[in-house]
Amino acid sequence: MTTPAPTLPRVVDLLPHRYPMLLVDRVTELVPGERIRAIKAVTLNEPWYAGISPDTVLDYPPSLLIESWGQSAGLLASAAAEAPAGQVMLFGSVADAEFHLPVRPGDVIEHRVRVSRALTDSVIFEGSSHRGDETVMTVARMVMAFRPAELLRPHEPAPTTPSPAPTGRETVQ
């Protein structure tokens, strides 16, 4: 069953990303555990277009299109279930992504992501991105994994004992 529009999640409530790396504007359809449709409006105001010369081609960077699609997949994974206690979701890999048409400022891209397989600690997605009726990108497989957050934090160094302050009476050997 499709979630009705008024109950669709806010992107910022489910993703930790913020400007300039929050690359999903809104969710238009969500079936938890199955599929999501999310929108990314590409604008000339994005930082990767800053300072470019007037004759530069304005194609949206493919790496950012993949990132935006992956954020949509992350929204789908987050909506299906809360991450297990102490776990965070990580991008694992992407395979067989094909870019069919350039994306440029002014384009509104719809990411369509489906869960192809859900495992205990990982989710595998597939899908595509569209500009109107045109397919601009297809993704055969993206893997995201849940891992313990503690593995991502650097270990704190052991506390050190401060050396006593010099008194001026020390002997040098």
Image: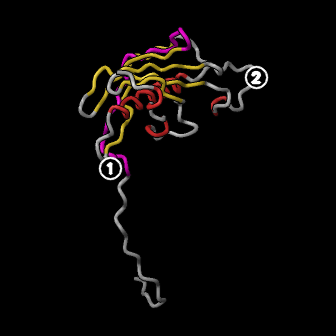
Q: Main secondary structure of the magenta part?
A: strand
In the picture of the structure, the residue carrying the numbered disc 1 is 150
Task: Give SS at disc 2.
Answer: loop
Question: Within the image, what quadrant is residue 57 found in?
Answer: top right
Q: Is residue 21 magenta?
A: no
Q: How many marks?
A: 2
The CA span between labels 2 and 1 is 47 Å
- Residue lying at the far right in this picture: please name it: 54
Span highlighted in magenta in the image? 131-153
Q: Residues within 10 Å of mark 1 (few under 14, many from 20)?
A: few
Determine which residue is flagged by label 2: 54
Tell me where residue 91 appears, x and y as whole percent.
Answer: 39, 32
Identity, as a three-letter code, of the amino acid under mark 1: Glu
**Label 2 crowd bin: few (<14), some (14–19), many (20+), radius 10 Å:** few
- From the viewer's perspective, is 69 left or right of 117? right
Q: Residue furthest left?
A: 120
Q: Quadrant of residue 25?
A: top right
Q: Amino acid at mark 2?
A: Pro
Q: Residue at x 31, y 37 (%)?
A: 146
Q: Residue at x 36, y 68 (%)?
A: 159
Taking the view exactly as shown, the residue that stands out farthest to the top is 133
| Quarter of the N terminus within the rendering | top left
Q: Secondary structure at mark 1?
A: helix
Residue 137 colored in magenta in the image? yes
127 vs 93: above or below: above
- Residue 46 placed where, x, y %? 64, 31
Tell me where residue 72 appears, x and y as whole percent.
Answer: 45, 27
**Residue at image location 44% in from the left, 23% down from the top:** 29
